[in-house]
Every structure is written in C-alpha cells, then in structure tokens.
Amino acid sequence: MLERLEFIESKYDELSIKISDPSVMANQNEWQKLCKEHSEVETIVLKYREYKKAKEDLEADKEMLRDKIDAELKEMVEEEIKELEKSVEDYEEELRVMLLPKDPNDSKNVFVEIRGGTGGEEAALFAADLFRMYTRYAERQGWHVEVMSANETDIGGFKEVVFMIKGNGAYSRMKYESGTHRVQRVPDTESSGRIHTSAATVAVLPEVDDVDIEINPNDIRVDVFRASGHGGQCVNTTDSAVRITHIPSGIVVSCQDEKRQLKNKEKAMKVLRARLYEKAEAERSAGIAENRKNQVGSGDRSERIRTYNFPQGRITDHRIGLTIYKLDQFLDGDIDEVINGLITAEQAEKMKEMGNTKD
C-alpha cells in the first residue's frame, strides 16, 4: 500500500508542475485533462501526507521516551502516543478505502427511470412518491433535476417518469437505487382499510458521452407526434414530441417535455445512449463470477431492494438488512443513512476481495 501511495504522491507532484506550466496551459484541452487528473488524486495525497506527519510525530514521541524525562512529562508523552497510534490506524483504514478500485462512472450525471409496477394506480402513486423523494434528495445535494419524459395518471401518479440529475458524483450515490421498491400501505381508494402491497422499479443509468457509445444513424427510426398531458389532454398543437427506436436492440425512447422537436430529439438520444451503454455493460459483465450477483448495488432491476412500510413507519433495505423508522423524513429526501450503509458494505466487500481486511 505504501509503495502505491508513494507513486501517487510522485505523480501528483509531477502534475502540479505541469498544470502551472504556461506552455501546457496554452493547450486548454490538455490542461483541463491534467487538472482533472490532479484533482482526482489530490484528496488521497493530502490524506497520505497527514498520515506521514502523524507517523513522524509518533516516532518523535517514542524517541523522547527513550531519553530521561521527568514523570509528569513522561505521562503526557505516553498519552499523546496512544492518541497518535489511534490516528495512524484511522489514517491507514481511510487510505485503504481511498485506494479501492473506483467505478469510472461515479462522477457522472445520471438518468433515473421510475415505472409503476404491480399494483395499478397505487403503484403509479408510489412512483410519484419516489420521484419526489429523489427530487428532494437532489436539492439537498445541490444537484439539478431535469425531466426528460413523464406519463402521468389522472390522479397524480406516474406510469413512467424519466429524469436527469446533474451534479458532481450523482452516479456514485444514486446507483444504489436501481431495483424494485416495494410499498405496503392502505391506499386512499381503499374503503375497508386493508393494507395493499405494490411496487415500482427504478433504473439508474450514467450519462454517456458520444465517444462511449457510437450510434449508427441507419440503426434508428425517429417518429414525431403531438405531445399530450395526462388523461389524453393535448398540451401542444405541433408535432414536437419525439420517439426514437433503436432497431437492432428494440429499445424505444420518447421525449415530449420540451416545446421544440429538436430539443426533444437531443434529450431522447441522450437517454438512448445511456440505455445502450447499460445493455453493453450488462452483456460484458454477464460472465463474471457467481458471487458478483450478491454484490451490493448490483443494479439488477428484478431484485427487490427495499420495502417502505407505512403502518409501521419503517424502511428496510434488504441488501444490507438495515431497517430505520423515519419514513416521512426518508420520503422527503433524507436517504443518506441508507446510501452510506450501502457504500460501506460495498467497500467492505471490495476490501475482502482484495485481501485487504485485517484478521
């Protein structure tokens, strides 16, 4: 680990010199690329330097104990040694986590697709609850939400809603939301007060650059139609809505949120690119070892990942067996406790796979 950290620090120092070089700054594309690389390793390097300073202080204190010092000073030094030893251990643990393999998509914006599943109108209403929950979470993070397409029901639910979340690190946290979300509650339409169980599926896809996925124009069919609101109410008098069909895969994407046809086509192409990327990644990883299926945040949409129980006010994440009793706050976007738990579990799994865990 220390050898790797030394290499990263050396690379960081090289990059620091390069990004300050006027001749490098003249090439803006190259300079921005180097700045990004510099920024990515800076946190690790600063933490490593704190670790080295703590180790130096620890050695200096131990050296002081070898000299003849009075009893009062000796007691102070021994106490400081205990604190420094704890700090060194904590730094080592943090650095191990920082050196774990990173998901290359973690810094990207995301597309989130929510679809009402089993449960009819109640499932559509739950899909709307999830949409609000993620919108509120994005606000808390300082991210921006942009709706791509929405198929609303007459009473305010969503058969389907697709939206984009723009923000640094959006995928690194939102990726854990992919899967089937189950809700248990008494619907407003239920006169007998019986608890119903329904579900909605969530898919989280990273935004994909043009260079990541190349789409042959001959492989797509573009249809235009008139945008409409829920209940069939027409909201536009021109054919501005766009439906794109990717013929080889059969994937269909539609967008009607914008008033201009060109803007809707651009949005639909972004979503199509993300879906094709997800499909390619799923095919690529299909042959990976069986234990990967159990990995936290695998993103399997058929997997029931979480239950929202209204009568008991609880949320249970089935992947890590975590149950919390603050449903109202959770649905208002306070979901960090569960996401942090999932991140910790995934890090532990990665450390186990790499043989970095301590006995």
Image (cartoon, rainbow, N blue to C red):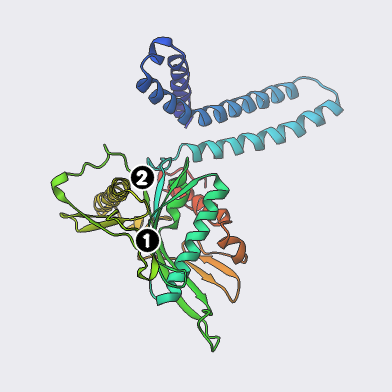
Q: Secondary structure at mark 1?
A: loop
Residue at 77% across, 34% down: 79
Residue type highlighted by circle 2: Glu
- Could you tell me how far apart the alpha carbons at marks 1 and 2 are, in whole angstroms? 28 Å
Q: Position of residue 81 (x, y in %)?
A: 71, 32
Q: Nearer the viewer, residue 116 or 283?
A: 116
The answer to whether residue 74 is left or right of residue 15 is: right
- Position in image of residue 263 (x %, y %): 32, 46
Instruction: Answer above or below: position of 352 versus 203.
Output: above
In the image, residue 82 above or below residue 313 = above
Disc 2 secondary structure class: loop
The local crowd at label 1, few if under 14, some if 14 to 19, many if 20 or more residues have their Cα within 10 Å, is few
Looking at the picture, does residue 280 appear above or below residue 128? above
> Which residue is nearer to you in this view: 349 or 29?
29
Nearer mark to the viewer, of 1 and 2: 1
What amino acid does circle 1 point to? Val
Please state the horizontal and vertical placement of residue 275, each as a whole percent of the image. Answer: 29, 52
Q: Tag 2 or tag 1, which sits nearer the N-term?
A: 2
Which residue is located at x 51 percent, y 84 percent?
190
- The reply to whether dot 1 and dot 2 touch (C-beta < 8 Å) is no
**Number of marks in the rendered image:** 2
Occupied quadrant, residue 25: top left
Residue beneath disc 2: 207
Mark 2 neighbour class, 10 Å CA radius: few under 14, some 14 to 19, many 20 or more: many
Is residue 121 in sight in this rendering? yes
- Indicate whether 338 appears above or below 93: below
Q: Residue furthest left?
A: 218
**Label 1 sits on residue:** 235
Is residue 341 at least partly visible in the picture?
Answer: no
Task: Please provide percent x and percent y for residue 218.
Answer: 13, 47
